[in-house]
Amino acid sequence: MEFRLAEIQDLPEIKSVYKQIIKVMDNDGIQIWDDIYPCDYFEDDIKNKRLYILIKNQKIISAFALCNENRGEKFVKWENNNAKSLYLDRFAVKKNYQKKGIASLMLEKAKQVASNLGAKYLRLFVVDINKPAINFYQKKGFKRVDGRYIEVFGDGFKLREYGYEIKLLEITK
């Protein structure tokens, strides 16, 4: 398997992978992503060198973005607001690679990259109805913080998101 930063030529495949993932999530009753999010963000993620992909047999099987900020960051109480942190966003694994350790591997990669970039915390937001993700992050040591971010869309649709964080270990080089 190859783990690396995504490049602009990966964009069509990344969008295709996420469209498949969105269909699976919709079928599972987790209707939180659509044609706009997350796909419209990938080009910017690639240009800003924050989208990471995992490739197996020359196919993208998982991806995530590591962002410097998140719209919900001011709505929750982090352990240390002043500590450098990165936000794990748009994290997904292709359906046929789920429950095979890929999510755990990618989460470890995210923690390593974040730590190497000087972050003291890896943070994320999870929509309240995404129970599988909540269970996964809690199992991996992420702690839910007080508060929540409510994202309201133009049509009145609301997503309630909980903040989670994990303190990163210092990696000596």
Image: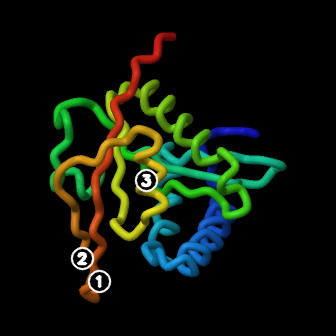
Q: Amino acid at mark 1?
A: Phe
Residue at 33% across / 66% down in the picture? 128
Do the residues under discs 2 and 1 have CB atoms within 8 angstroms? yes
Q: Position of residue 129 (x, y in %)?
A: 38, 70
Q: Amino acid at mark 3?
A: Asp
Badge 3, how many Cα within 10 Å: few under 14, some, many 20+? many
Q: Tell which circle, 3 or 1, labels the residue nearer the N-terminal end.
A: 3
Q: Tell which circle, 2 or 3, labels the residue nearer the N-terminal end.
A: 3
Residue at 28% across / 58% down in the picture? 162
Q: Is residue 39 above or below residue 125?
A: below
Q: Tell which circle, 2 or 1, labels the residue nearer the N-terminal end.
A: 2
Q: Position of residue 62 (x, y in %)?
A: 63, 52
Residue at 31% across / 36% down in the picture? 85
CA–CA distance between discs 2 and 1?
6 Å
Q: Is residue 8 left or right of residue 79?
A: right
Residue at 34% across / 30% down in the picture? 167
* Foreground residue among 47 and 98: 98
Colouring of the image: rainbow
Q: Is residue 47 at all visible to an observer of this figure?
A: yes
Task: Write down the residue under mark 1.
Answer: 157
Task: Write down the residue under mark 2.
Answer: 152
Q: Quadrant of the N terminus?
A: top right
At numbered mark 1, what does the secondary structure look like: helix, strand or loop? loop
The count of marks equals: 3
Q: Position of residue 91 (x, y in %)?
A: 51, 54
Badge 2, how many Cα within 10 Å: few under 14, some, many 20+? few
Residue furthest to the top: 173
Q: Amino acid at mark 2?
A: Val
Task: Write down the residue under mark 3.
Answer: 89
